Image (spheres, rainbow, N blue to C red):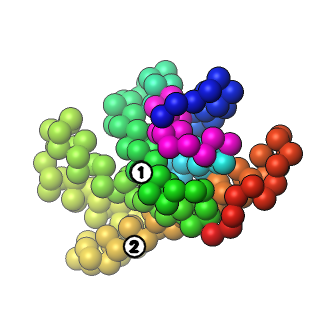
Amino acid sequence: MKFNTRQLVTLAVFGALWGAVEISLGSVLNVLKVPLSGAILTAIGLLVAMAARIFVPQRGSTLFIGVIAMVLKLFSIGAIVIGPMIGILAAALIAEVTLSLFGRPARLAFIVAGGLGVLWTLIQPFFTGLLLFGRDIVDIWMGLLREGTQLLGLEPEAAVWIVLALVTLRLLIGAVAGWLAWDAGRLLRARLVGESGSYSEA
């Protein structure tokens, strides 16, 4: 993971943008108690980070952006930031590993990376809740079911359908973010650098 000065500046800009989204929009969504706010924030952050992958198509670039955004999250006012910081880093790491496994940037890689990165928001409470906040796993599970019943209008007894629906929703949100990141990154690069069609379509 070795970047030149220009690449570092590019990654810093995109990392700052993700961090700004987390600080500003994150606070608004939290106050308004918007459903799936964590998934939405993660999707937007990954959209930014993966768009940057078009500019710096090297291993480690997406994770580097996530680290910057995570550090900036410390400046959030009036909020518990440990959980969100872990979420940012984990999503960036998942996206980084996925993109690296695919190798050359491609739309399919972005879609898969986005979907898996956002899916982490469903899994994270079972880690941070148990390890950091001392929550009982039953309490975490019941919170998941409550989210499903409020969002989908299903009864708690339909636990399997609730989980499947929540998984599907997060995968779709992340996939859309990946799709948009691919187009946004290529468009920005074409306008700023004057290079279009540098990467093959998936």
Residue at left offset 82%, top offset 49%: 195
Q: Magenta span covers which residues? A: 55-68
Q: Which residue is mark 2?
A: 165
* Left or right: residue 145 compared with residue 64: left
The image shows residue 30 at horizontal and vertical percentages of 48, 41
Q: Secondary structure at mark 2?
A: helix
- Is residue 177 something that shows in the picture? no
Badge count: 2
| Res. 97 mark | 1
Which three-letter amino acid code belongs to the residue tagged 1? Val
Mark 2 neighbour class, 10 Å CA radius: few under 14, some 14 to 19, many 20 or more: some
Q: Nearer the viewer, residue 142 or 202?
A: 202
Label 2–label 1 contact, CB within 8 A: no
* Left or right: residue 171 compared with residue 9: left
Residue 30 in magenta stretch: no
The C terminus lies in quadrant: bottom right
- Is residue 112 something that shows in the picture? yes
Residue 57 in magenta stretch: yes
The image shows residue 118 at horizontal and vertical percentages of 45, 55
| Res. 157 mark | none
